[in-house]
Image (tube, rainbow, N blue to C red):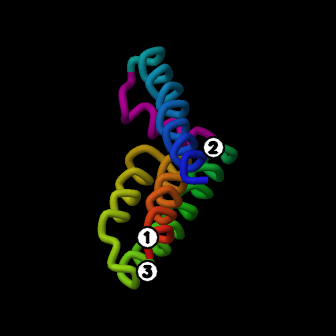
Amino acid sequence: MRFVYLALALWGAVHPMYWFVTYMQQTGTGLSGLIDAWYVNASTTGLTWDLTIAAVALTVWIVAETVSRKAWVNLVAIPATFCIGVSCGLPLYLFLRSRQAKVG
């Protein structure tokens, strides 16, 4: 399962980023234009909030488990979540977490 998590983390980093970069190149608006597009209508705003709430919940889980397990390297999944997306951060955390479960 570890390599499935790692493959999903890589896919979750590359695939969405491809579309983000494509959008920014097509519109020429850069990151600010991309963020503006997240709130262009009720549908995209709802999806943005859905992913934001999921990212916050994932962050709370990561922090809680990291403190109890003292596996500080797992905190790297937090910036991956907020800088890349939940599609990268969640499988990355599961990959890192499964390493500790195997050792301990």
Q: Residue at x 61, y 53 (%)?
A: 1
Q: Is residue 36 shown left or right of residue 7?
A: left
Q: Residue at x 47, y 15 (%)?
A: 26
- For the residue labelled by badge 3, is the local secondary structure a helix, a strand or a loop? helix
- For the residue labelled by badge 1, is the local secondary structure a helix, a strand or a loop? helix
Q: Please tell me the numbered disc located at residue 103.
A: 1
In x, y percent, where is residue 67? 36, 81
- For the residue labelled by badge 2, is the local secondary structure a helix, a strand or a loop? helix
Q: Between residue 61 and residue 34, name the one nearer to us.
A: 61
Residues tagged 3 and 1 counted as in contact (Cβ below 8 A): no
Q: CA distance from mark 2 to mark 3?
A: 30 Å
Q: Quadrant of the C terminus?
A: bottom left
**In this view, 40 is above or below 53:** above
Q: Residue at x 44, y 59 (%)?
A: 96
Q: CA distance from mark 1 to mark 2?
A: 42 Å
Q: Between residue 54 and residue 48, name the one nearer to us.
A: 54
**Residue assigned mark 3:** 64
Q: Please tell me the numbered disc located at residue 44.
A: 2
Circle nearer the N terminus (3, 1): 3
Looking at the rendered image, the disc whose residue lies closer to the viewer, 1 or 2, is 1
Query: Crowdedness of circle 2 by 10 Å Cα count: few (<14), some, many (20+)?
Result: few
